[in-house]
Image (spheres, helix red, strand yellow):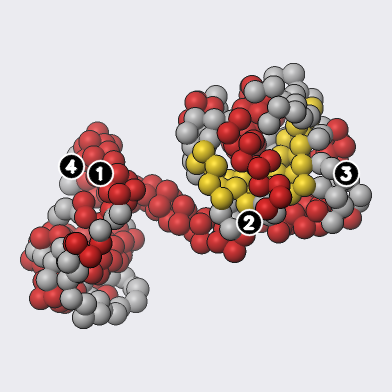
Amino acid sequence: MTTRLGVGVIGAGRVGAVLGSALRSVGHPVVGVSAVSEASRERAETLLPGVPVLDVPEVVRRAELVLLAVPDDALPELVEGLARTGAWQPGQIVVHTAGRYGAAVLDPARAKGVIPVALHPAMTFTGTSLDLARLEGCTFAVTAPTPVLPIGQALVVEMGGEPVVVEESARPLYHAALAHGANHLVVLVAQAGEALRAAGVSDPGAVLRPLLDAALDGALRAESAGGAIATLTGPVRRGDAGTVRDHLAELTDLAGRTGAADVLDSYTALSRAATSRSLVEGLITQAQSEALLDVLQPTHTSGGAGGSVPDVQPTDPKDQE
């Protein structure tokens, strides 16, 4: 995109301030930013120095490209409210960054003549200048009406990212997948760290880092090649029901001593999922899966649904090629 556009940033949160700074760095002047909290004002001052902090309607009035970086739940009401007050201007490009929504959430603005684009970076943000370097090669989900898809793709490329088109109907599933992967990874680290501290390890992060770095790197490489489950290690992969039983006993004791029943629940649920996927991929036998599932009954947890893995014959790896 060679045309330089005046950018208005609505929401100087971790995402908005960083993307505004990224667009500014490639020549798009930022003409205004809205920032309500003290933290967002400080972020705007740091990442967008010299940019005036304005109320939302004034940011929209000044901008040729409006970047909406607000919480997902606030987005529909904001778009509709600005439409009711006549704030949107024909020909404006309006970009939102909510992973949950596609371009349809911008329909009230589109009815006023704007160009709607949904861009979602598949990255966690700190809201600092460190994020700018991490945008290089970052995947952005782009959703827009077909004629204007190139505008969204060009903006992503300008910021150093890699655009991937996600259909409107697929945005909720896309967002659920990212939240499940990134957010629950954090929860798993927290749970493993709590168990390690209870085991007397003073720095759980140092113990987990090389193990989890290697596991995550291997799984991601394998997923790009066709399937992460092939890199699974540990007692489920070995069909070692006895070890799993011992783990459950220890985690039950931990829950009783500390109240950390969520660790036990997560271990049980994910071990069942690992059993299911291992059986389907032919990593364990039907007999091994049944032994594991017998141990992994919901009675071992503080709640949750039961169920069993269907009788699936191991898959020949050649069938996956």
* Alpha carbons under labels 1 and 3: distance apart: 49 Å
Is there CB contact under 8 Å for labels 4 and 3? no
* Alpha carbons under labels 4 and 1: distance apart: 29 Å
Q: Amino acid at mark 2?
A: Tyr
Task: Say which residue appears at 71% left-offset and 27% top-offset.
Answer: 2
Q: Amino acid at mark 3?
A: Gln
Q: Amino acid at mark 1?
A: Gly
Snapshot quadrant of residue 10: top right
Mark sitting on residue 97: none
Crowding at dot 4, Cα within 10 Å, few <14 / some 14-19 / many 20+, comes out as few
Q: Nearer the viewer, mark 4 or mark 1?
A: 1
The x and y percentages for residue 35 are: 73, 35
Q: Residue furthest top?
A: 50
Mark 2 or mark 1, which is nearer the start of the sequence? 2
Task: Say which residue appears at 49% left-offset and 26% top-offset.
Answer: 133
Mark 3 or mark 1, which is nearer the start of the sequence? 3
* Alpha carbons under labels 1 and 2: distance apart: 31 Å
For the residue labelled by badge 2, is the local secondary structure a helix, a strand or a loop? loop
Q: Which residue is mark 2?
A: 101
Mark 1 or mark 4, which is nearer the start of the sequence? 4
Snapshot quadrant of residue 236: bottom left
Q: Nearer the viewer, residue 147 or 253?
A: 147
Mark 2 or mark 4, which is nearer the start of the sequence? 2
Mark sitting on residue 89: 3
Mark 2 or mark 3, which is nearer the start of the sequence? 3
Q: Image check: 77 left or right of 207?
A: right
Crowding at dot 3, Cα within 10 Å, few <14 / some 14-19 / many 20+, comes out as some
Mark sitting on residue 218: 1
From this viewpoint, is residue 131 visible?
Answer: no
